[in-house]
Amino acid sequence: MTRTDELRAGNTARCQRLLARSALLDTTDIAWNRAGEVELDDDAIATLVYMRDVEGFTNRDLVGLTAHPTTHADPLLVAFLAAWRAEEAEHARAIDRFLGAYASCRGITVPPIQPAPPPTVPIGERLVVLATRPVGHVVTAAHMAWGAANELLTMNGYRLLAARAGNPVLHTLLTRIAAQEARHYSFYMLQAEWRLAASRLARAVLPWMLRRSWTPVGIGDGYKRPSEFERVLRYLSTGDSGRVVRGMDARFSSLPGFGGLGIYARAVAAATTM
């Protein structure tokens, strides 16, 4: 057995254990009636609305490159993606419940959940799916790497908001959500690691793709505007957020072929210079 085979076997076993821990978020003991006891400022509420909506965007069928035949030929990935979608949708519902309870207590209104665009596939993406069938392993590696990048950002965003907002009920809720996001991140990262280690082509192509194409989770046509992310970033960029960004870049850049990638620092720089 080669070192790559050993890495694949070990990471697969760890992913199976992570998948076995999948469960919808438990909020049965959350004191919703106390959600409004500690006031949140407008930026905290806007950040929560952004996070709620982004979580809700995952509650849709996977299509196009995210439903690539190579990815969906792997039963472990199919099972994980189904559990991931269900857990993310539950995060959106839980955050929306908090916002509703808070708004009721405080006598304010909050925007309703923003629906995701219909899961249609542009003709160009359909052609890409067909063209990449011979190198589907690269597409799956890209999916896993993108997932790891997004989950790492989301996990740390929840942790920063929990600490920043100072609302005990919200802190409890977001800490639990962050723990599930950490599990999602670990799964994606483990899958990306062995797939990158196994493919020289993936190691060559994916860093270039990430430098050109990666944007923070939730941004895109029909989704969130860059200005909305910038507001979230400004609110969360206090205290040791610079250390958090450097830590995220260090962790993500540990993937094979990703040394010095620095996608988070570039995203922060782009948002703060607009």
Image: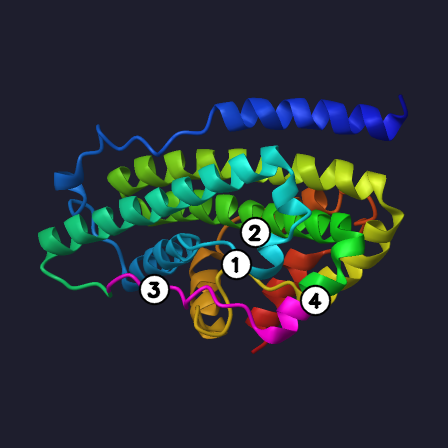
Q: Which residue is mark 2?
A: 150
Q: Is residue 158 left or right of residue 252?
A: left
Q: CA distance from mark 3 to mark 1?
A: 15 Å
Q: Secondary structure at mark 1?
A: loop
Q: Which residue is mark 1?
A: 217
Q: Which residue is mark 4?
A: 128
Q: Earlier in the sequence, mark 3 or mark 2?
A: 3
**Residue 124 falls within the magenta-colored stretch:** yes
Q: CA distance from mark 3 to mark 4?
A: 26 Å
Residue appearing at x 71%, y 63% in the figure: 130
Indicate the position of residue 201 as horizontal and vertical percent values: 86, 52
Q: Residue furthest bottom?
A: 274
Residue 115's mark? 3
Q: Earlier in the sequence, mark 1 or mark 4?
A: 4
The label nearer to you, 4 versus 2, is 4
Amino acid found under the numbered disc labelled 3: Pro
Seen from the viewer's position, the closer of residues 80 and 11 is 80
